[in-house]
Amino acid sequence: MAETKLVTITIDGKAYQVPAGSNLVDAAKWHADNDIPVFCYHPKMAPVGMCRMCVVELGMVEKDRATGEVIMENGQPKVRWMPKLQTACTQVATDGMVVRTDTDKVKAGRESVIEFLLTSHPLDCPICDKGGECPLQNLTMAHGNGVSRMNFADKLKLDKHVPLGDLIYLDEERCIQCARCIRFQDEIVGDDVLAFHERGRRLQIITKSDPGFDTYFSGNTTDICPVGALTTADFRFGARPWELTDVPSICPHDAAGTNISLSTRLDRDFGGRAMIKRVMPRQNEAVNEIWISDRTRFVHHFTRSDDRLQSPMVRRGERLSPTVWNEAIPALAEVLKAANGDVAVLAGGGASNEDLWELRQLLKGLGSERLGAWTTHSGAELLLEVGVGKGSNLGTLGKGDAILVVASDLEEEVPMWYLRVKQAQDRGAFLAVANHRPTRLAEIASQTERKVASQTERKPLVGKSVLYEAGKAAHWLNDLANSDPELYNTLKDAQNLVIIAGAEGLDWDGGRALMQAAANLLIAGGHVGKPNNGLMATLPEANGMGLQYLGYTTQNALDIIKNPPSVLITAQCDPLGDDPTAGSWMSKVNTLITLTLFPDDTTQRAAFALPVQSFAERDGTFINGERRVQRFYTAQGPMGDALPLWEIIARLRERLGQGRAKVSAAAVMLELSNHLPSFNGIRYKDLAQVERQYPDVGGKDLYYGGTAYQNKGGLGVQLPTTADNGSAPTTGTVNLPEVKQAKKGELLLIPTVRLYNRSHIMRPSALIANRVAKPFAALNNADAKKLGIKHGDRVEVRFNGGQATVTAQVSDSTPQGVVFVPRYLADTPTPMVITSASVVKVSDAVAVQ
Amino acid sequence: MNIIKGFRTTFKHLLEEPVTLQYPEQMRPFEARYKGRHHLRRYENGLEKCIGCALCAAACPADAIWVEAAENTDEERYSPGERYAKTYEINMLRCIFCGYCEDACPTQAIELGHEHQLSFTDRRDAIYTKEMLIDPVPSGGKPTPQKVEAGAFDRAIPDMPDPK
């Protein structure tokens, strides 16, 4: 909380110093440890005073109007009490406020509210997914009357199973009409898709969107719902809440490093092993507050998919056949020894720091330093210099600050950042969004005010959205001072400036140029080396930052592509599935060793395919896009013979005579942080440190903040940048690459990212299958006309290395001369970087089934 | 005198019927409230009373009960409510036959019966599955899962008399 003036308020006879203007419910909880019960109030949202549960007796110390002195009565300050009970949630702390929460009058008030809410609440508790962690249950036990005066048979009978979209179910009988879900969508996410329908007793929640509940954050409404009205389709009847074991973990999908809690339980159908039953948010105010995106919540089934590679495979002739570790490891050792140091690694962002360290040591022992990062983003080395300062928190950006999001569709790439950037703008920050196509965030940025039903006051919003020529992100940003001095100065002169850079439409050279241009802007404005200032990048997967810290670079990857080694190890990446042109250089590799979760396209060509464990089955650490090293714990039982990646390599190293294999991930981290100065000697126990966070959610009083978990697994440690450490970064030259041009008669193919796609990780989650877009290519009207393509036609996109048959989406929002092809949607690999492609019509639009 | 008194008792008992029963050929009658092994009850139409709420497992002081629940559909309906027990297992070696499960059950689905002859040669045999615990389908009822008319059951929990 920001430092503000303190005022004295009296709660139940004791005086407390609280910040002026703080909400009374929050203040009582934080300072006086007094849990005022609430249903509709939520610390992250504006109060509405709808449920009346938080009633208290409220008064003000009387002062003499002339002198301003407190009037005393019998040695006590005289208090002028309000005649009736007041809702604490709509009161802000002011000097001299006196509150009573334990009088008979207050108790009677609370009891009446509970009785009123229960007049028609069904007795579903035994089967309700919320039963056991339900605010209504808890508050009824604490404040309700033990006996009902209502006739059970008279209760309203309503629809009990209303799907709001594919992911969330509504039980109309259970809803107590607190509007938390509606307000969350409206105020926090900005996807105003829920609403009240009808009035009085018939008041119901409905979804206004098509498809229903169309947002990437719908799961959070089930957490903050104070009853079991909203439940997820994923967890439905999965277990009772008290049976679950909560394991702290980190979202494996994107650079936000969302803190999650995996609720596990032994499962008979899973062979009696512990199984993830649901994914819940874990509070980390600097990272994800108490929210998680739907991808984080609903995409966990891949960890126990039968499609996973479950035993080490070795190629015998044409086919890969299963083997055991005791045979695979010696065979691998022979291959590596015979390679004579001509070995390289390509690692993806899914591998943890421990994995990357063991691989690095393996290569070092073999006499090679060819550590390549397989990622779409380059220039990550700048994040180590001018990354966001230590102590940054997007949640504290506000008036006077600025955020620039460039070359990224943030909602699809890192939804958590999207949410927090949007909220920063709500608080008054200037939001600039630049891309070559309109995105959701660009629309948000250009809004001058947002209609929020629960707030009568409309704060003006500041922001700007800019469209630049396709693929020219670096050119645009580098030339910003000349082309748009107003925007340039707004950004440069802001109190704090954060730049979030993506890589849409950029190859590795272009990405590096964009990062350098962004760094130059930050350095020019002095926005480096301090909190809430600096550069962030939407690095794909959870550990893109770890790749950079451990020395895996795109420069090395480029070198590997240009001079393929004799033996190539791919670690949790699938070059052949990601890039249709990879086959041309991959064929020059003699022996391909792949460490993978799924049998993917690279596995098809590998000599050895080794199953690795997913994040859920093992310990490890990821570094998020804000350079926060965060730890995840073993949650789920192992699949088949899969081992943690680091352990496979450690065993292999032992076989190669590189020293005894480590026995735990903690031991690997110990060695890693002792050797790499950038890790500041951090240990696992440092990563597990926690502290009290505001607001205080997840305690016994679930009603306050919902079922987001208290952080007991650690807040992580943010690594300092070189600028944080005092070395002043200097601006570098931006090497503007030539932008790829389409060949004559062709279009420029730009790959885009979709939150829900058909990658190996997504496919096993059947729930989101309906949300995954059908494979498409987005074209401009004029281009489509020229090519004789109509909206909805089946078209074939032909590019270097392959083709994909998709549906054409024709609109004006796609720039001319460009075709956008989302990655991982089509059945065949589509390009990973900007390239030239031809689009040919295959057949007419088929009627939509 | 005392010796006569003593022999009187002896002879009196000599002439009495012996109380020893030839167990297991002969069985002693059970009290109605005797707590033997559990039964999972059915409604007359054959649907299961158990709704898979796992309150029995929560109440169990010996951690003997394991419940995994799943959702009923109109195509495959096991119980009248929304939810049924997909897995229901009681480890008879752990069970102390206290009857708390019976008390905790909101639908009176689990009841302790009179069977007490439980012996096993393998610890795994001591785990009674749902198939072993559930009553046979009553005459006139249909076995579960049943295919029912859409919308015939719209309650989350079947209506039941007010708990007394």
Image (spheres, helix red, strand yellow):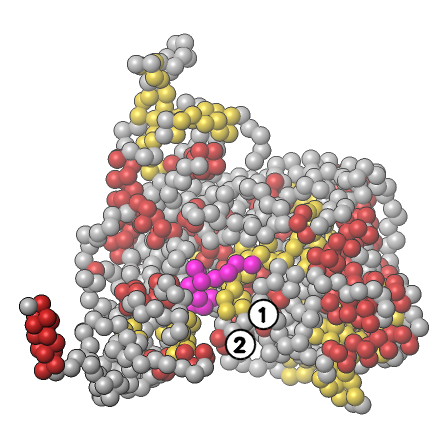
Magenta-tinted stretch: A235-247
For this view, does A808 lie left or right of residue A610?
left
Q: Which residue is mark 2?
A: A271
Compare residues A802 and A69 and report the one nearer the observer: A69
Q: Is residue A86 magenta?
A: no
Q: Quadrant of residue B75?
A: bottom left
Q: Chain of mark 2?
A: A
From this viewpoint, which residue is outermost toward the top? A67
Seen in the picture, residue A53 relative to B71 is either above or below; the reply is above
Exactly how many numbered labels are in the figure? 2
Q: Is residue A784 visible?
A: no
Q: Judge the density around disc 2: few (<14), some (14-19), many (≥20) Cα neighbours within 10 Å.
A: few
Give the secondary structure at mark 2: loop
Q: Which mark is residue A637?
A: 1
From this viewpoint, which residue is outermost toward the bottom? A317
Question: Where's the N terminus of chain B, which quadrant?
Answer: bottom left
Give the secondary structure at mark 1: loop
Q: Are marks 1 and 2 in contact (CB under 8 Å)?
A: yes
Q: Which mark is residue A352?
A: none
Give coordinates of residue A143: x percent, y percent. 30, 45
Residue at 62 percent across and 59 percent down: it is A633
Compare residues A637 and A164 and report the one nearer the observer: A637
Q: Amino acid at mark 1?
A: Gly
